[in-house]
Image (cartoon, coloured by chain):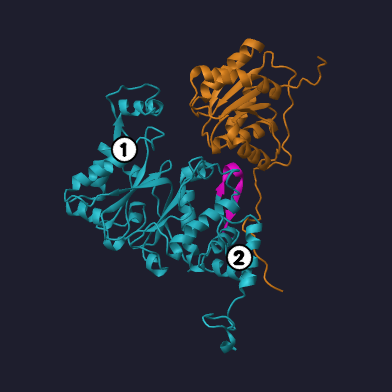
Chain colours: A orange, B cyan
Amino acid sequence: MPNAILDPTGSVKSKAATAAAPRARRPASLNGARVGLLINTKQNARPFLEEVGRLLTEKYDVTLTERTKVNFAVPEPDEVIKELVADNDVVITGVGDCGSCSAAAAADGVVLEAAGVPVAAIITESFIPTADAMAALRGAPGYPYATTAHPVAVLTEDKVKERAAQVIDDVVALLTDSSGKND
Amino acid sequence: MTDEAPEGSGALGAPEAPDPDEAQRAIEYCYDQGWSDGLPLVPVSKPLLDRFLATTDKEPDEIIGSLEQVGRDVDVRTAAINAAMAGCKPEYFPVVLAAFDALMRERAARGGGFQSTSGPAPLIVVNGPIRQELGFNTAGGAFGPGFRPNMTIPRAIGLIVRNAFGIHPHVLEQATQGVPGRWSICVAENEEESPWEPFAENGGAGGGVSAVSATLTRTMEFVDNRHTPNHEDVLRDFQDTISRIGSQIFPLSSVALVLCPEHAQMFAAAGLSKADVQNWLIERSGRTGAELTSMGKAEVNRKGFRGEYEGDDTFHRFLAGPTSIPVIVAGAKNAAISMVVRIFGEWSGTAVPVVEKK
C-alpha cells in the first residue's frame, strides 16, 4: 500500500462562515428610513455614497448617517457592526474598487445582514469574482450587491453623480421588499 | 544488469533509482488538486511530513498564523506540507516558520496585502550562521535564482497563502499585474562584506543569532553607479530613484535600500553609519507640490495634510523616518549596483529568531 499524497489546504475550514448566513428582512419601502453610509475611504467613495444618500433623501425623506471604515481592506470589527445595527435601518457601503476592499464590502454586507440590517454594497464590475468568493466563504453564496462600471477613482465630480444616479434603482431594490405590492 | 542499459543512460536500472513515471503521476495529481503555483510540486507523504515536523518543538496543531478576513488559520502541520511541496529540505522548516511569523507580524500582510491589486511579493531577509549551515547564497545574484533555500523558502510562503489561506489568483487574489519573482525573493545578507551591523540587529535580534525579517514589496529598481569616487553623488542617485512619483500612492512611502558591498563600503569609508545614510536620504527624498500635481498626484498630496493643499512650492518628504528606509547589504563585491526596493505599506523590520529543535 503506497503512502497517500497529503493535502496542503489544512483541515481547518473558514471560521468566518456561518452556516447559510441569513439575509435580513427588508422593509417594504425606504420612506423615513435611517440610512447608514459606510464609506471605505477609496478615492471617490465619499462623493459617490453621499450622492446616493442625497437622492434617497430627496425621494424617500431618509435620515443619513456617515461612517468611515476603520480599514478598507478588512471587514469592520464587531463593535462597529453593533453600532451600525443600532443606528440604522439599512446600510449602503462601498465603493469596492480594489482586491481587498471589494471582498471586505461583501463581508461587511453578509455580517450586517445576519445581524438584521439590509445592506446594499456597491462594487465595481472588475471585482465581481472576489466579492462573490468572499460572500461564499462567509456562508452567503450568491449574495446580491450593486455594481457600477470600473473605474470609479478617476471620475470627475459630475461623472460620480451620474454613476450614483445610475445605481440608485438597484440600491433601492436591494434594500426593500416590494413583493407585497400588486403594482 | 547495468551493462544492458543504453550508453549515457546514467543510473537507469540501478536498484535505488526512483520510478519517473510514478513521480510524474504524483506531480500531475498535485496539479489536478489545484495546489500548484504553476510549477511542479513535490508530492508529500507522511514520512516526509514527519521529517519536517521533527525539526521543530512546536506541536503539529499549533496555529502559527491567521487571516481574519477569510477566517482561515495555518497550523504547523499544514505549513510543513506546503514547505515540503515547495521543495524545501526538512532542515529549512525552522526558517520557513520564522519567515512566516515575521511576515504575519506586518500589518500590511495581515490586511489586504495578499489580495491586493498591487500583487506584492514577500521579501525575506535571513541573517546569522543559519545562512552557511543551510547553504543560502550570500554572495552574487542575491535575488536569485540558483540556490535551493533562497528559492524554496519564499515559495513555501506562497503555497501557504494559496492553499492554507485559500487565496487564489483571479478570485481572492486580485493582482493587476503583480511582481516578477513573486514568492521567490529571499536574500541572505552578505554580513561578511558589510561594513555595518547585521540587519537582524536593527530588528531586535542579538548579535550572532540566526533570524529572519520579512515584508511585502511591490517592485525593485536598480541604481547602477560605478562612475564616481564621490559618495554624495551616489547618494543623490539613490535620492533620485527614491523620489519617483509613480510609486507614490500615499503622502508617505517606504523603501528598503539593498546595497551592494561596494556602495556600502564606500559610504562606510566616508564615515557614514547606516543611520547617516538613512538620514541623508530622508531629508532629501521627495517632491514639490507642483511636481506631484503635474503628474496627477495632487490628491495623494492632499490626503496627508488634512485635506488641504499646501501649495506648489512646498517640498514633501516621502520617507517618514529610519523605519521607512531600512538598509541591507547583499550581493557580490564585483560592481556598484544596488537596489531600491519598494515596500508595500510599512515595514516594522522585526527580526524573528530561527528556533531549531532543542
Give the mark, 2 or 1, whose residue is nearer the N terminus. 2
Task: Name the residue carrying label 1.
Answer: B243
Task: Name the residue carrying label 2.
Answer: B43
Query: Are discs 2 and 1 located on one and the same chain?
Result: yes
**Which amino acid type corresponds to the residue marked 1 in the rendered image?**
Ser
Snapshot quadrant of residue B201: bottom left
Drawn side of residue B226 relative to residue A153, left or right: left
- Counting from the top left corner in percent of width and height, residue B184 is at 46, 56
Q: Could you tell me which residue is drawn at 64 percent across and 43 percent down?
A: A16
Give me the disc on residue B30. none
Give the CA distance from mark 2 to mark 1: 46 Å
- Counting from the top left corner in percent of width and height, residue A152 is at 53, 27
User: Disc 2 is attached to a residue of which chain?
Assistant: B
**Which amino acid type corresponds to the residue marked 2 in the rendered image?**
Pro
Q: Is residue B93 above or below residue B321?
A: below
Residue B64 visible at all: no
Q: What span is in magenta?
A: B66-76
Q: Is residue B267 above or below residue B89?
A: above
For mark 1, give the secondary structure. Answer: loop
Work out whether residue B273 or residue B334 is closer to the camera in this orientation and state it.
Answer: B334
Pointer 2: residues within 10 angstroms few (<14), some, or many (20+)? many
